[in-house]
Structure formats: C-alpha cells, structure tokens
Image (tube, rainbow, N blue to C red):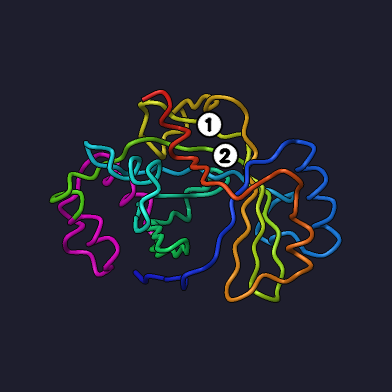
Amino acid sequence: MSITENKYRHEWKHEISKADLLSIRSRLQAVARPDPHAKDGKYLIRSLYFDDPNDKALREKTDGVNRREKFRIRYYNFDTSLIHLEKKCRINGLGSKYSAVLTKEETQKIVDGDTGWMKESDNPLVKELYCKMISGRLKPRTIVDYTREPFIFGPGNVRVTFDYGIRTGLSCTDLLNPECVTIPAGDEHIILEVKWDEFLPDVIRAVVQTEGVRVGAFSKYAQCRIYG
C-alpha cells in the first residue's frame, strides 16, 4: 500500500444560508469547473471518525487547539471498492491530509476491533493508527454522512465545496453496513469551504464573499456528536 500526503494548505470555512448557496454557486459556475469525480455535480460522503475515551479530538476542536489531528475512514457514493484511511492535521490555521487505501476486509477488521494485522502492515499510516488505537485507546466513534458539491479552479490549486445534509450514525460505527441508519445532525447546516495553496486568486475571493458571513470553525464531526 502507498501513502499520499498533501502539503499544508490554507482553509476558510463558513456556515451560509440557502440563499447564499444559490448565489455563490451561480457565480462559481461562471469561473470554476465542477470536480470531474462528482456525479451530477455532487457526491455522497460517508466517514467514520475516531476518538479516545476522553474525546480528545472533539475537545481539541471545540477548544480551538492550535495543533491537532484526527483520523477517519472515508468512502464515496456508498462505493466500497475504494476506501481511504485519512489523518487530518492542523497547525497554525493550515491543514494537511495523509491518506492510505484500505481494502473492504481491512476496513471491517478495524471497525470490529481486530487490529493485530495492522502492526505488520507496510503502510506507515496504518501502523500509526494501530499504535494510537493500542496506546491512546483510539476507537471508532461515530459515522458522519453528508452531500458535497465540489468546484475546482486551477490557479492557486483552489477547491471550493458546499457541504450539507449532515447526518449522524449515533452509536452505529459499522461503516460498511448498508443497514446502518443515520439521522439529521440537529438543524440544517450548509458549509462553504475554500482551500488553496500559496495564494487565493482575487476572482475566487470575490465570488465567495458573502456579506455578514465570517470565517468560522464548524466541525461536522462535532455536530454529529450532539447526541453523545
């Protein structure tokens, strides 16, 4: 297995209204292009987030800790033929992501707490998760579902996404089980995310500007923990 790493990127995150979504989407369509991996302009994301018994990842997010990380397993459009283990890191407001491919069988073993095989893995990210599951008591905590509309813009390697329809799996962590029921995670939220490398082009900066909306720290994982 291989591991991929994105360099640290800038990120804006805003909670916006439905009217904002319609307006910004219309402006984006004139200057950016939809992510070619999206189907009909969007895709469904299902993630399984990990945390320890003290909810370290949750507390660090809500407390705004400057240097933090979180692990998750993710796949798209309920297609289990491609599953990723991901570690998200954030330092001084910049974000980076490490990613490794898991098989369906490996994923189910992790969900079931069968971790012995992980220490023999040739992938360092799998080994790191194993160490933190053993020494830090990290374990699957909750499923997070949502819909994403992604747009890309070449200069600056910009990615703009709208996330909505956030749902929580409550106590169900059986990621690959199609019978795992999710419910809306509180009130409806629409999240605009803008990510870029060294610079954010003025045209994109103008397109995503919304009066009265400030950069926030909305967390889909934290939102999905409102029930426990």
Picture disc at residue 146: 2
Work out whether 89 lies above or below 187: below
**Magenta span contains residue 128:** yes
Q: Secondary structure at mark 2?
A: strand
Measured as percent of width and height from the top left, residue 160 is found at 67, 58
Tell me the distance, in whole angstroms, between the alpha carbons under discs 1 and 2.
Answer: 6 Å
Q: Residue at x 62, y 29 (%)?
A: 188
Q: Which residues fall within the magenta stretch?
A: 102-131
Would you call the spot at circle 1 few (<14 residues within 10 Å), some (14-19), or many (20 or more)? many
Measured as percent of width and height from the top left, residue 180 is found at 44, 28
Is residue 102 toward the left or the right of residue 20 in the image?
left
| The quadrant where residue 1 appears | bottom left
Q: Secondary structure at mark 1?
A: strand
Q: Residue at x 48, y 53 (%)?
A: 81
Q: Which residue is mark 1?
A: 167
Would you call the spot at circle 2 few (<14 residues within 10 Å), some (14-19), or many (20 or more)? some
**Magenta span contains residue 113:** yes
Picture disc at residue 36: none
Q: Name the residue type under label 2.
A: Tyr
Measured as percent of width and height from the top left, residue 35 is found at 69, 60
| The quadrant where residue 205 appears | bottom right
Measured as percent of width and height from the top left, residue 203 is found at 79, 67
Q: Name the residue type under label 1.
A: Arg
Cβ–Cβ below 8 Å for labels 1 and 2? yes
Work out whether 28 lies above or below 56: below
Is residue 127 toward the left or the right of residue 106 in the image?
left
Q: Residue at x 25, y 39 (%)?
A: 112
Mark 1 or mark 2: name the one nearer the start of the chain: 2
Image quadrant containing the C terminus? top left
